[in-house]
Amino acid sequence: MTNNWVDIKNANVVLIMGGNPAEAHPVGFKWVMEAKTRNAAQVMVVDPRFNRSAAVADFYAPIRAGSDAAFMLGVINYLLTHDKIQHEYVKAYTNAALIVREDFQFHEGLFSGYDTATRSYNTTSWDYERDEQGFAKQDPTFQHPRCVLNLLRNYTSRYTPELVSQITGTPEKDFLHVCETLASTSVPDRTSTFLFALGWTHHTNGSQIIRAASMVQMLLGNVGMPGGGLNALRGHSNIQGYTDLGLLSTRLPGYMNLPKDSQQTLDAYLQAVTPKADEPKEVNYWHNAPKFFVSLMKTLWGNHATDSNNWGYDWLPKWDRSYDMLAYFERMQQGKVNGYIAQGFNPLAAMPDKNRMRDGLAKLRFLVTIDPLDTETSNFWQNEGVYNDVRPEDIQTEVFRLPSSCFAEENGSVVNSARWLQWHYAGTQPPGEAWNDGRILGTIFTKLRDLYAKEGGVCPEPVLNMQWNYQDPEDPMPEEVAKEANGYALADIQDATGKVVARKGELLPDFSVLKDDGTTASYCWVFAGSWTEAGNQMARRDNTDTGLGNTPGWAWAWPANRRLLYNRASLDPQGRPWDPRRKIIEWNGQRWGGADVPDYPLTSPPGSGVGPFIMQSEGVSRLFAGASLVDGPFPEHYEPTESPVLAPALGSKVRHNPVARQFADEIPRMGNPSEFPYVATTYSITELFRHWTKHSHLNAIMQPEQFVEIGERLAGKLGVSAGDTVRVSSRRGYIEAKAVVTKRLKRLNVMGQEVDQVGVPCHWGFKGATRKGFLANTLTPAMGDANSQTPEFKAFLVNVEKV
Ligand SMILES: Nc1nc2c(c(=O)[nH]1)N[C@H]1C(S)=C(S)[C@@H](COP(=O)(O)OP(=O)(O)OC[C@H]3O[C@@H](n4cnc5c(=O)[nH]c(N)nc54)[C@H](O)[C@@H]3O)O[C@H]1N2
Ligand SMILES: Nc1nc2c(c(=O)[nH]1)N[C@H]1C(S)=C(S)[C@@H](COP(=O)(O)OP(=O)(O)OC[C@H]3O[C@@H](n4cnc5c(=O)[nH]c(N)nc54)[C@H](O)[C@@H]3O)O[C@H]1N2
Ligand SMILES: [Mo]
């Protein structure tokens, strides 16, 4: 989220697309209702299904699953052709005026630099034209044909309302209604907020859908504004914390990248993660990356990390190939993985193409599950008839089940979608033999370390040299770990004026004091400030409103307790708020202050020319993204891996995202529309949380049995009535479930053909208190987004038959 939950109430228009917060975020959703009652906000839902959010919205439009990029590119085209952009904002705060290299091209669906053999792009041409000093050239008059704005105008002109309607199946008048309503917020004193989640991420071009949406918000001048922004509604209660802490396979804590295999020296790595500014004045806060990185290394290896051994750089794993979940399970299926630890993770249920997933688990020598519940994954070897059709005698995998506590049984912090770290306290003790995760991991770690110390082995240093200063090394306390994340001064730390800002041994006050000389340690720089000498900031519960619903005394938000990212962009370059009713920060003549923590150098005066997007090398937001995404500097519509549309629209030579994550062994498992004519998508429902709460009797009573949703016209065609059992099959397998026949799924007209969509909620399985059911992921394809590798759970092909 750029903004925060409470801030949704400040919006004039709420676009809910690719998310269903009334269902999946029912508590946060109250702020949407606040926007309606306080501001008469227009709430619009664009979704394949008329869902529970749509039920209380002002407007609903249907869309074919997997076609959102075309919709958003169409909105951009509408805004540009109808001149509904916030000109001053676009000029001052985006890269619209920057000039792109002459050799950058887009032709028949491909950007310049595509290599068919490696299915990847050489991105050299995706850059600005630069002057002698290496700074980007620009044309603030927008005359230059290759300035970003003109390129974008030309690029999106293909996405006419008529074509968008053909690709998406959204009736043209509905599409135009969304365009007009969004366009009403191009004026300075109206904003729209975008709420999205999995309906946008679970696609082979998911990152580009979200980019297209952020471009719409930039053109409308809505980024950095109270009541604006691009607001990702996160999943599990701490999934935001998971990304903050770098638990993705290519990341380190604080959104730093894991070193690549090609970056064998610390210098090579630091140079790569410390980009130069594209303009002379810009701040480019990432120039501090060496301070963040060395402080992380001092936390990992403690006294073993020294200047002379490059802070232990050689002990960090180097990224030599993909280790994301799809890639890992592919290797498992090829018999190349010995052991797997699934901690708080039920991959048999959660990952795509369940039958292949199960075959992979069967090739492991051992599987460890760490979970409070008896999951499908830990029982993958049990025969459950049609629900899990295996021969246990053929499976040799040894399974260890380590019962853990759950979050409610321990102290700790969870980070919500709004980046707030909120401390909570154990409600009760874990039952039986359950240990909390810290104790399980601490015990495994110390035992492994003892083995390395005794027996040596290949490369023991990373384990032996790991700093592990916990009172009980086998049971680190959440409080100890949280303080480590904040960080400590390892010597007296002075600021630029020579004032001591932290004494040796003290907790650090914030990340501005971090050093790259080994005198500070901080595990996650964006968390610095969360637990200081003043105490645990995450445990604060002062809900005083400093303006526009801002409550800086409630918990603590990263970074620096800032609640609204890019908030300097809520004022014009001279420091006047675009909308006086939405003033959230201000210049007092000497420094910036106000209701929120300014996202800007505190003493850079208005008019200084420093851009408001201080994490970007341009200082402005990017309508043209350069090489920051692997599949193009502009978003493009591509068909999902499985799609009913066989002839690519838009004069394109390529049907699918040409760099989408794809696996050779999975390609033969893709179906075609002649056998599997219907578009299916998967989603969750309020009464059940993933494959987890079906173990609770109350939840099981509310949703006792698996169902799928089909539209009335499709049901009529198939002779299916409500309550009949239907078989839904894809090329990869089938499920059987009760049919809910509904008006909420409409037949759509897509590229001249009629397309029916099928809704598959994904919660049931062969464990728990509900009736046994099929894992919905029996149906889904193991193909992924080109950038995030997220599987395409939300658009694939199925057939439906009455059983
Ligand atoms: N009760 C409950 N709450 C939950 C969860 C749960 O299981 N149960 N799960 C949690 C987790 S882990 C997460 S990540 C979040 C997920 O939160 P959401 O993303 O909101 O949940 P979903 O139901 O997966 O999908 C949202 C909507 O996307 C729509 N959709 C599907 N395909 C497309 C498409 O191609 N385009 C568009 N525009 N829309 C599409 C679906 O019809 C659905 O209405 O919820 C969290 N909250
Ligand atoms: N088809 C389809 N597939 C999907 C999705 C979809 O929309 N459609 N959504 C995807 C998304 S967004 C997600 S997040 C994944 C979810 O995938 P998973 O995370 O595998 O799903 P959960 O069922 O929530 O499993 C979490 C497990 O953590 C356990 N647990 C709870 N608290 C603790 C704790 O404190 N410690 C430990 N060790 N364990 C704990 C729970 O008992 C549960 O078994 O599924 C993905 N898969
Ligand atoms: Mo999620």
Image (spheres, rainbow, N blue to C red):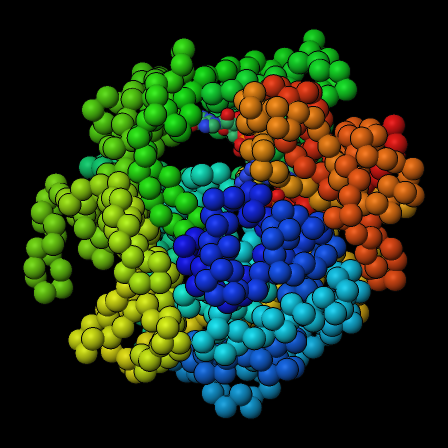
For image coordinates 35% across by 63% down, the residue present is 548
Q: In the picture, which quadrant includes the C terminus?
A: top right
At which x and y percent is residue 263?
42, 51
At which x and y percent is residue 656?
73, 56
At which x and y percent is residue 33?
51, 54
Looking at this view, is 617 or 39 the one in front?
39
**Against 194, is 294 above or below?**
above
User: In the shown orientation, is residue 753 left or right of residue 700?
Assistant: right
For image coordinates 52% across by 44% down, the residue present is 26
Looking at this view, is 580 or 65 the one in front?
580
Q: In the picture, which quadrant includes the N terminus?
A: bottom left
User: In the shown orientation, is residue 450 left or right of residue 118?
Assistant: left
Q: Is residue 760 visible?
A: yes
**In which quadrant of this rendering is ligand 1 seen?**
top right
Report which quarter residue 609 is drawn in. bottom left
For image coordinates 91% across by 39% down, the residue present is 718
Q: Residue furthest top?
A: 393
Looking at this view, is 98 or 710 the one in front?
710
**Against 678, is 738 above or below?**
above
**Against 442, is 185 above or below?**
below
Q: Is residue 318 visible?
A: no
User: In the shown orientation, is residue 446 left or right of residue 417?
Assistant: left
Report which quarter residue 404 is drawn in. top left
For image coordinates 69% across by 20% down, the residue present is 772
User: In the shown orientation, is residue 185 left or right of residue 62?
Assistant: left
Q: Residue furthest front?
A: 37
Report which quarter residue 153 is drawn in. bottom right
**Against 609, is 34 above or below?**
above
At which x and y percent is residue 398?
56, 13
